[in-house]
Image (cartoon, grey):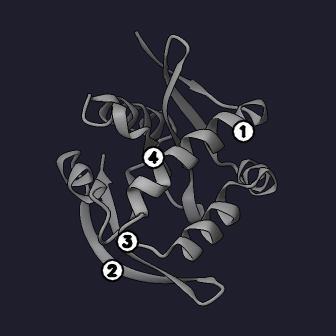
Amino acid sequence: MITISEATSKDFKIIQAIAHATWPVTYGEILSKAQLDYMMKLMYSEESLFQQIKKKHQFFIASEGIHNLGFMSVEHNYLDTNTTRLHKLYMIPKFQGKGIGKLLIDKIVALAIENQSDKISLNVNKFNKAFTFYKKMGFEVIAEEDLEIGNGYLMEDYKMEKKL
């Protein structure tokens, strides 16, 4: 049975392991190795994960028995609005396409409703195959956004929303 449980700082190693397993597959053909390494350190160092939790990001891990399948991070009242933000959702590649991502989306929808949000927002790289998944889950493109993240690197994203 698949369970989704809230992560704590004790679970950082699990989150980092899932990120290290997914990012090269997800972004290997989109980003240079140098940018990939830079972003992994920027987003998944222990210090960065602590800062994200301090900023009210909640992490959830999907698992089945002893196997960790994926994770997501969310933030309620994003930018002081009635929006729940999906910051991250990553599934280990061999577990993709098995409905686990949908379970995580269902979880964020339930959390958003519980927190009285009227929508869920996210950014996704324009070339990420997950874009199709998010469209299937009811998210719509509302804008395009290029974000400078330092070191001369750029994130080229679609901004998407799902109304609740």
Mark 3 touching mark 4, by CB under 8 A? Answer: no
**39 or 49: nearer the viewer:** 39
Give the alpha-carbon distance from disc 1 to disc 4, as whole Å. Answer: 15 Å
Q: Residue furthest bottom?
A: 152
Residue 7 horizontal side relative to residue 128, left or right = right
Pointer 4 residue: 89
Q: Nearer the viewer, mark 3 or mark 1?
A: 3
Pointer 3 residue: 30
Give the alpha-carbon distance from disc 2 to disc 1, as whole Å. Answer: 31 Å
The type of residue carrying mark 3 is Ile
Mark positioned earlier in the residue sequence (1 or 4)? 1
Q: Which label belongs to residue 54? A: none
Give the alpha-carbon distance from disc 2 to disc 4, as whole Å. Answer: 19 Å
The total of numbered circles placed on residues is: 4
Give the alpha-carbon distance from disc 3 to disc 4, as whole Å. Answer: 17 Å
**Residue 14 visible (yes or no):** yes
Pointer 1 residue: 12
What element does badge 2 sit on? strand
Pointer 2 residue: 144
The type of residue carrying mark 2 is Glu
